[in-house]
Image: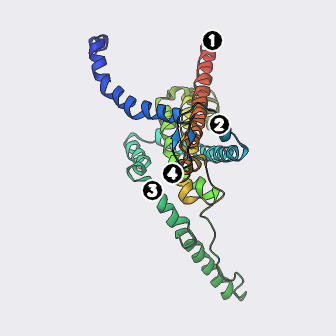
Amino acid sequence: MEEWRKNKKSFAVFMIPATAWLVLFFTIPIGILWIYSFGERGPQGQTYLAFSFANYARAVEWIHLGILWKSMWMAGVTTVVCILLGFPLALGIAFAPQKYKNPLLLLIIIPFWTNLLIRTYAWIAVLRSKGFLNFGLEWLHDKMDYVLTTVGLGSALGAFEPVQFLYNQQAVIVGLVYVYLPFMILPLYASLEKLDKRYLEASLDLGAGHWRTLFSVTVPLISPGIASGVILTFILALGSYLTPNLLGGTDSMMIGNLIAHEFMAARDWPFGSALSFLLMYGAFLAIWLKSTIETRAAAQRERS
């Protein structure tokens, strides 16, 4: 293995296919979009190359910043909910008996085997006015109405009115949590799996309770996994397009929907490219902040 690593020519040969793939299908297309972001839209949707910051100036107008802020808020709520749900699940999998770990991980990974469009339409079937959730509520309503009628109170509940679960921000957040929860669970599980359990045993032996051990020992030790899950979930949710497009309403447009509209409906590729790069710059900033915080935390731990 060491000889193979020292042989730089062999290493370069093995790297050529992956490097060529990244250059052809990632670097070059991203570079073209970056050039387009400084261009101008023609009267019939053509793109003229220029060097103008007009698209970026337009992208930071209040109406577009409002959509970006709403997207950040929805992505933030999604991330918080994913932490609250994902941490106990990851903790349960990490401390489960060895024979149960792989089946439990399989349950987390199985949704990736199904197309996202199909999974999103499944949520429509659950949340719509005549969906499974409203059917369940109607059944409970009818049973309660029957009980009230039996005891002589009459039909006090009245006719059942379906609850509007679909086409709003809450439905979008539910869909985003469902889609991106595995991206929170897996980094948390990886950190918990590598955690030295002797630290937890020492904390318990010294008199700390389970809750104090959890928040004073476990959480600080797996903070890199938490940070990775947060960044991954937030960035993916922020740029989401399909889920808000299918589950959301007029008040649920996110930045990904706006970018898709500019490319496909408005045929304004320069402005769509500028919006895309603003989103990308924000993602790079979040990753840089994560790396900086982790580096400083590691340096502080070494000094202490």
Of the image marks 3 and 1, the number of the one nearer the N terminus: 3
Which amino acid lies under the numbered mark 3 shown in the image of this protein? Leu
**Amino acid type at mark 1:** Arg
Circle 4 residue = 264
In the picture, residue 6 is in which quadrant?
Answer: top left
Q: Nearer the viewer, residue 274 or 206?
A: 274
Q: Quadrant of residue 3?
A: top left
Does any portion of residue 46 appear in the rendered image? yes
Residue 111 lies, with reference to residue 150, above or below; the image says: above
Q: CA distance from mark 4 to mark 3?
A: 19 Å
If you read the primary sequence from the N terminus, does the residue marked by circle 2 or circle 3 appear first?
2
Q: Nearer the viewer, mark 4 or mark 1?
A: 4
| Chosen colour scheme | rainbow
How many labels were placed on the picture? 4
Mark 1 vs mark 2: in front? 2
Residue on which the image places disc 1: 303
Q: Are marks 2 and 3 in contact (CB under 8 Å)?
A: no
Label 4: element kind: helix
* Vertical position of residue 123 compared to residue 302: above or below: below
Q: What element does badge 3 sit on?
A: helix
Q: Say whether residue 294 is left or right of residue 125.
A: right
Q: Earlier in the sequence, mark 2 or mark 4?
A: 2
Q: Amino acid at mark 2?
A: Ala
Q: Earlier in the sequence, mark 1 or mark 2?
A: 2
The earlier-in-sequence mark between 4 and 1 is 4
Local crowd size for mark 3, using a 10 Å CA cut-off: few (<14), some (14–19), many (≥20): few
How many angstroms separate mark 2 from mark 3 (CA)? 35 Å
Residue 266 higher or lower than 185, as above or below: below
Residue beneath disc 2: 54
Q: How much space separates mark 3 and mark 1, taking CA atoms?
A: 50 Å
